[in-house]
Structure formats: C-alpha cells, structure tokens
Image (cartoon, rainbow, N blue to C red):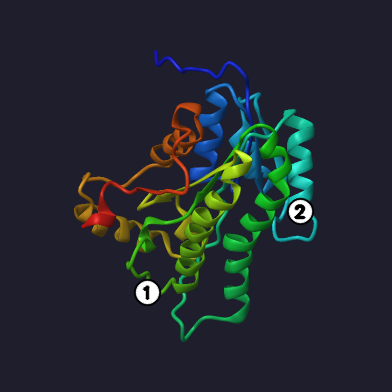
Amino acid sequence: MQTVNRNSTPRGVIVTGGGTGIGRATAREFAARGDRVLVVGRSESSLAETAAAHDDIHVMAVDLTDAGAADLVVQTAVDVLGRLDVVVNNAALAGFDTLEDLTAQDARQQVEVNLLAPVFLTQRALPALEKNAGTVVNVSSAGCLGLRAMPGSSIYAATKVGLDALTRSWAVELGGRGIRVVGISPGLVNTGVAVRAGMPQEHYDAFLESMQPRIPSGRIGTPEDVAWWIVQATAAPGGYLNGAVLAVDGGLSVT
C-alpha cells in the first residue's frame, strides 16, 4: 500500500475547474496529503463526483466570470476551510476556430474564463494568502510555450501565454508580501477537454494517437501526472521556486 505524507497543518486550497481532468486530480491529490480543498466549477454534478468519498473536498458551483464571483469564492473558502494557503487557477475554456471562423462571443468567453477570471480571483485572495505566505499556481499550456504556435486555437494560446506573463509579473509584485506565484504548463494530457469543446471523440482519439510517437517519454500524460507537480510546487520544501513556468509534457516542448 502506498504511503502518503500528510501535512501536519491542513492547508486551505482553492482549485478552479475542479469538476474534471487536471482539476479533479489536483483536488484529490491535495486532499490525500491532508489539505482541505474547495473545488470550483460550473457543473454541480461533476464537482460532486470529484468530492465523492473525499471528506476534505468541498464543492462550489459558480461561474467565475459572473460579477462578484471572485469575492464569493474567496469568502466561502475562508469560511469553509478555515484559512487559504493555495489558489490553483486551472479553469479554462478551449477553442478550435481559425481566425477566419472566430466569433466575438467565442473570443470574449475564452479571454474571460482563461485570463480575467484568474486575475480577479487571485486579486481577491491576496489578503488571505498573505496571512499564510501562500502560493498561486497558474495552469497554462506547454503547447504555446516560447515561440510555439497553436494554429486553430489562437485565442486559447494567447490567453495561456498571457497567464504565463501574469505568473512572472505577479511573482515580482507579490514576493515582498511572502506570496509565491508559479506556473505549470501541461502538455498532451488525456482529459477529454477537446471533446467537451466540441471535437468528435474519434478525431480526438486519432489526434492523441498521432502525437504519441513525438513525445520523448513515449506516452500521453494523465491528469495525475500534472496534479503531482502542482501540489509539489506549493509544498514548503519548494519555497524557492517562484516566477517559473514548468512544462509537464514528457519533453514534447523541447523537440
């Protein structure tokens, strides 16, 4: 049986986009280590599945782009968890439109969910995070690190590049307040996000199969692969990590 090192003092953790994929795995990884977690998302039923059989995972169904949502989430976390130590900005909306086909509504939705929601949730969380020398983790994408392109998903890529810029900027802004900010950039991870965004399942499966030989590690990632790194980045022994964006992609971004 695997032994889990539980934290002596449970931390309070917010994980957005916690109803599926990386968010779900991350919430469960924090809970397994003895932390108390508030998972946030739009689907109450998906959040309930995340929390099933996990007493330390609490759920909150809310649209983070709604007015007042950030304040409500932070206050709920403090009330329910007792404290706030970690904010994981994981919620994201993917888009698969070329520039020619892109609509204003699709573009605005991606910017609001992927970029503006993390901005204002983190802003509202600052007082609580400062009390506990907390950590912010921004989950971006290894698919658009550096000079890499994501044709057909340009708005999504732009929001994730922007999130990386926020990670670096906030690390400098907030370092004097004892708050760390780090980025985790997943590569190809089988979360089904493309299918939920409208891609046919057979196209998604074919895409993953075609990409696997290009990954130096020889396989597609799992949500648990990324969740482990998110939790490690927030641990006290990793306290000198700040302002960095780590690619968790099996080496694909360096090919």
Can residue 19 be spotted in the picture?
no
Indicate the amino acid at tag 2. Ala
Q: Percent from the top left, x then y, of residue 36?
A: 64, 28
Q: Percent from the top left, x then y, of residue 122?
A: 65, 50
Which dot marks residue 254?
none
Q: In which quarter of the image is the N terminus?
A: top left
Can residue 59 be spotted in the picture?
yes
Tell me what residue is drawn at x 45 percent, y 52 percent. 192
Residue 144 in the figure: left or right of residue 62: left
Above or below — where is 198 with respect to 213?
below
User: Which residue is identified by label 2?
Assistant: 69
Q: Which secondary structure lies at badge 2? A: helix
Which dot marks residue 151?
1
Q: Which secondary structure lies at badge 1? A: loop
> Of callouts 1 and 2, which one flags the residue occurring earlier in the amino acid sequence?
2
Q: Nearer the viewer, residue 165 or 232?
A: 165
Above or below — where is 108 with respect to 35?
below
Tell me what residue is drawn at x 68 percent, y 34 percent. 84
What is the residue that sits farthest to the front in this orientation? 176
Q: Percent from the top left, x then y, of residue 12?
A: 66, 31
Residue 249 in the figure: left or right of residue 226: left
Above or below — where is 105 with respect to 93?
below
Indicate the amino acid at tag 1. Pro
